[in-house]
Each structure stands twice: as structure tokens, then as C-alpha cells.
Amino acid sequence: MLLQLGGRHICFDLLGDEGAPVVCLAHSLSADMGIWAEQVSPLLARGWRVLRIDMRGHGGSSPGCEEAYTMPGLAQDVVAVLNLLGLDKVHFAGVSIGGMIGQQLGIDHPHRLISLMLCDTAATNIPGGETVWIDRFAAMHNAGSLEPLADATMDRWVTEEFKTANPERWNVIRATVAATTLAGYFGGGMAILTFDSRSQLASIKVPTMIVWGSNDTGTPPAGNALIADAIPGSKRSVFEGARHIPMVEQAVAFTRVMANWLADQRGAPVSEPIIY
């Protein structure tokens, strides 16, 4: 489905029974809604409705060119989709920049949230990150695509063991990275460079869970722990040995944690004891 916003459009899909509680999922930079493929069927089977949104310039969403990307603007895109669908409040889960969008929603639009799950994300750009972004932007512009960034991205996201055991899934995700529009990647990178939620995290009052891979170098564990420490009453869970996208790399364990967290938020029985 598409939402027209001025001269651009946002692609999203909504699956599940009408009337079921909604979980909205946001992906990482240079991914698309497919990064959550392993969670869709289990969530539907547990009685959830699943909303996935492609960020500007990613997947089926056009990049737009009328304004620079900012985290408040990307959060407003989510709100626009919720408004179109007539959804008052949702549970929200986001990974990487999707988790930054989640933080922004918790700060600017808390009345649209029931709960937050922030995955492998950060409250601000990592130290020295500006040089990293400049190098990435130069490489992709010289090549005219994200192809030069794809292998290094996959190395940050999953282990070599995952690649060997799951070559088809690895190739699908890599192809998605390489196919991301230059405008979408540049815009998202600039939004990350200008993002800093640290002074506002304490204002997030909705129930919040922060999860991360212990070997994530893209958004390192210390930055995730900082968010967990700053948001009052938040919970946390760490996936040992995982890198940047544990929802793919350790899908069974991640889905169990997610399903239990969501069940806890609606007062339903959980499948296993929750350990935070």
C-alpha cells in the first residue's frame, strides 16, 4: 500500500485481523520492511496485527527531494501512516535508525504509542562517525550505487557463520542494501549525524524495552545501555554473539523476547518466563 505525501509516497503493509492490536516495525538504514520477515508469521499467530513501513528512499518508498531528512521528519512519516489507517496508538519496534525514529516518537508523539522496543540503536552518532559517513557517501556517489558498501554492511550486521548457514537469506539482505537509493541512504545518514536524544530520553514515559547484540559494532552495546539507563523503568535484553540485526541472525531468540515483551504489555500470558 502507498501513502502519497506531496510529491513522494510511503510504502507500507498491514497484515492481520482487523481489531487486533498493532505492532509497527521500522527497519535499519539500507534495509527495508523485509528485515522483519522472521517475526511476521509468529506475531500474526499470536494475535497481533503487523504494520511495516519502508523509510523514505528505501524499499518501495520514494526518497523525496523537497527537504533534508531529520529524525522528527521521519517520525512524522510514521504518524502520517497511522493517521491514514485510523490507528490511534500502536506498539512500536525499530532497529538502528528505526530505533532512533522510535525514540523520536516517544519524545514528540507519546500519545501515539502503547510501548516501545528499541533494537540495536543509539541516542546520537558514534564518536568519529562523521568521518565514517563522509567516506561512505563518497564511495557510493563515485560508484553511483551502494554496491561498494554492501559487503562491509553485511559484515557489521551478521556473522560469517550466519552467512555460511543461511546463504539465500544473506544474499537477499545484501541485495536490498545494494539497491537502496543514494538519496535515501544519504538522507538517512544525515538524519543520524544530526540526531541527539540524550537530553530528552528521560521524558519517554511509555513502557520501553531496549535490546541489542553483544557484538554490534554499528551501534555498540554501550550506546544501547545508555538509552536503557536513561529511560525511566525501561527493560533490556542482550543477544550474546549477535551483531546488528539479531531479529535475523538469532531470529528464534529475538522473536521469543519480542513476543513475550508485547504479551506483557497487553497483560496476556507469555510463552516463557521473561528474563530482562
Image (cartoon, rainbow, N blue to C red):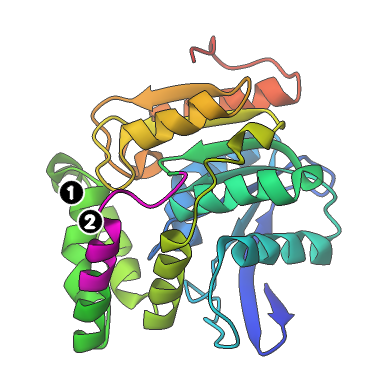
Secondary structure of the residue carrying numbered label 2: helix
Residue positioned 63% across, 32% down in the render? 202
Who's the residue at 80% across and 45% down the image? 89
Whether residue 57 is in magenta: the answer is no
Q: Which mark is residue 14?
A: none
- Name the residue rendered at 64%, 80% in the picture: 9
Label 2: few (<14), some (14–19) or many (≥20) C-alpha neighbours in 10 Å: many
Q: Residue at x 52, y 39 (%)?
A: 118
Q: Residue 121: in sight, yes or no?
A: yes
* Above or below, comparing residue 29 to residue 200 in the picture: below
Q: Is residue 222 left or right of residue 226?
A: left
Task: Kindly indicate whether the residue at mark 2 contacts the one at mark 1 (C-beta within 8 angstroms).
Answer: yes
The residue indicated by pointer 1 is 163
Q: Position of residue 172 (x, y in %)?
A: 31, 63
Which residue lies under the disc numbered 2?
154
Q: Give SS at disc 1.
A: helix
Q: Which residues are magenta?
A: 123-135
